[in-house]
Image (tube, helix red, strand yellow):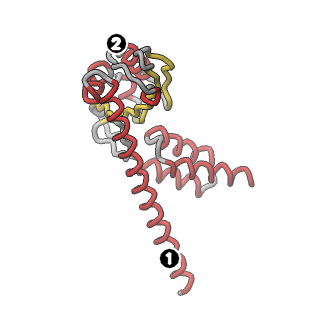
Amino acid sequence: MRTIFVLTLLAFSFLLRAQDQQSLHQQLTNERFETLRKILDYRFKGGSGEFERVLLSRVEYTPEARKNCVVGTMILMFTVSCDNTLGELSLRNPLHHGLNEQVQEFLKATDGMWNTCQDEKYTRFEVPVLFTLEGTETAARGLITVEAEDPGFTCRSDVWHFDRYEKFKEKGRTKKALEMLDLLIRRDPYNNSYYELKRQLLGAEATE
């Protein structure tokens, strides 16, 4: 009886911790987006809304990306100097299948669309863009969302991938478990809980 009570208490504690982590993740995401919007409002001609409009007019899902159920958050990292020189373009969490090239071309096309500034702290940008398909359940969020129709079937949800991770972990199939975590990280690269699970999994593998 005591064992059941302890296990129940541990499960409840784990659930509360998971909820707290998710709540903190959402709070940090909201704060990050708010700060980014303010910087884009200041630097981009027309503000963050115009930045989003231009991106969505130039970036869309490719047939290959839809067919392969590519869902993820690509992070656009670039600089725009105070005299409006665009530089240091890079993509964190690239999604491939023709999407990277579109985003790179979009960034280059924004040359001349920026306002001057007086402070270097307004020159570095990290813009998360979520690519998702209709009907795909994901907790991931982007400052901007590029959405397309499903490829004719419903793509796997976050929950499905996490469930597979747990099953592979239980069976000792570390490589497969890591693949599931990497897919979840690709979807939500700001979710620190996924990185913590990955560190634990790699740590357990190293001690075996």
Q: Residue at x 42, y 35 (%)?
A: 73
User: Dot 2 surroundings within 10 Å: few (below 14), some, or many (20 or more)?
Assistant: few
Q: Residue at x 38, y 51 (%)?
A: 27
Relative to 107, residue 25 above or below:
below
Q: Nearer the viewer, residue 160 or 106?
A: 106
What residue would you read off at disc 1? 9
Q: Is residue 131 left or right of residue 89?
A: left
Residue at disc 2, secondary structure: loop
**Residue found at the far bottom of this picture:** 1
Q: Nearer the viewer, residue 178 or 46?
A: 46
Q: Nearer the viewer, residue 185 or 29?
A: 29
Residue at disc 1, secondary structure: helix
What residue would you read off at disc 2? 112
Residues at marks 2 and 1 touching, judged by CB atoms closer than 8 Å: no
Label 2 is placed on what type of residue?
Gly
- Quadrant where the C terminus sits is bottom right
Which quarter of the picture shows residue 156? Answer: top left
